[in-house]
Image (cartoon, rainbow, N blue to C red):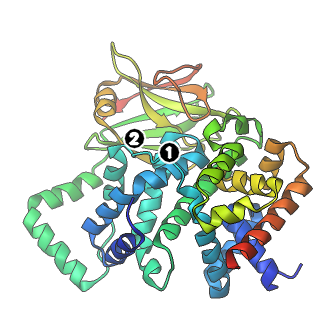
Amino acid sequence: MNRNHPEVLDLLAGEFVLGTLAGAARRRFERRLAAEPFVARRVQAWEERLSALNFGLEPVAPSPAVWASIERRIGGSRPRTWRGLAAAAVAAAMLGLGWFLWQDTRELPPQAEALIANPAGETLWRVELAADGGRVTVSAIGAIRHPDQRSLELWALPPDAAPVSLGLLPASGRVERALDERQRAAIGLAVNVAVSDEPFGGSPTGAPTGAVLYVAAVARS
Amino acid sequence: MGTESEIGRLLAACARQDRQAFQRLYELTSSQLLASLMRVLRNRAAAEDALQDVYVQVWNQAARFTSGRGSSWAWLMAIARYRAIDLRRRERHFTAGSAEGIEEIPASGEPLENLMMLGHRATTALHRCLAALQERQRDCILLAYEHGMTHAEVADRTGEPLGSVKSWIRRGLTSLRRCLES
């Protein structure tokens, strides 16, 4: 199959946008897409052809924590122009100490940490609560056996209160989540965190429904 | 939902690091993108995590849009879908390739329902051209697009042979393009 033939290239672009181009072929095509404007134009044409398929959907408003996380994540990027730099300087001056304190908070060590380990003592995840108490970072560390088509959910266990979900656990890599009021309060008081086995996508009820697989102590600094 | 020109203007402002414009863009577009992420990821928490990544990427790459792109909506949607597809493939890889989860797709995403919707609101050229496809070609394309399914997943889902699914999708895409260009 000649990958440069216009018809073939157009089909590859269509299957890339559709998502059916998968695995190594998808990665190869992504490299071409980045390097060859001719390929990029075909992909763009398919993106535009198919985008109308999204418009029948009922919109779903994201929870406020999502915007808070986005703002925080882009807050770290440096302005790229002199004008931007000047604007940032003015903003910093206006905000005065607050700005620097905020920067400082980001550098501070976590206020609490829990290491979730399997019975053999191998650490599977590290959960860190940021210094300001408003975010958790969960890093997958060990070789994690994930049940097929199930999800593993993390819970804060505050004393004398119901467990509060802190979201799903990643199989690999690191996720960072902004916490809402309820989650902040729960993790702020929790002595332990727990991991439960849940249906794919997480507990449908808001409380743990499956087996509790791991419990770990919250160490506060 | 914002208009095409308003979103294009906001993206241009984002390219100049205008945070207010970025917030406005988020307000106008995020619930639509979240709906589309949820359809592929089938999980609100995962979709909201992906939504974060999508907007961070939009902020960082807004300048790319201004260099002569067409539809701003299509650009945003494409970023969201690629993110969702990547995450979904990783999840599937991770769950040892079992196809059982596919049954969990909510009824609202059934191709049949889409077909009925097509009948009701064949407003765009795309819907007209989709309606003109052979039924099996259209079903396979809609399953793949809406849920981010691979060929194998579409085959599992429809109970049709993998080879047939592949060729229906190819032929369907070719007919779709010809119809849209005509």
Depth order, front residue of A22/B143: B143
Kind of residue at badge 2: Glu
Q: Is residue A139 left or right of residue B128?
A: left
Residue A49 against residue A128 in the figure, above or below? below
Compute the Cα span from label 2 to label 1.
9 Å
The numbered mark 2 sits on a residue in which chain? A
Q: Residue at x 72, y 39 (%)?
A: B102
Which residue bears the numbered disc 2?
A128
Which residue, as the protein is rendered here, is positioned at the far top? A160
Q: Is residue A87 left or right of residue A33?
A: left
Which residue bears the numbered disc 1?
A139
Residue B8 against residue B37 in the figure, above or below? below
Q: Quadrant of the N terminus of chain B?
A: bottom left
On the question of residue A174 being in view, the answer is no
Q: Residue at x 51, y 21 (%)?
A: A208
Find numbered disc 1 in the image and state the secondary structure of the residue it sits on.
Answer: strand
Image location (x, y in percent) of residue B28: 36, 59
Q: Please report contact status of discs 2 and 1: CB closer than 8 Å, yes or no.
A: yes
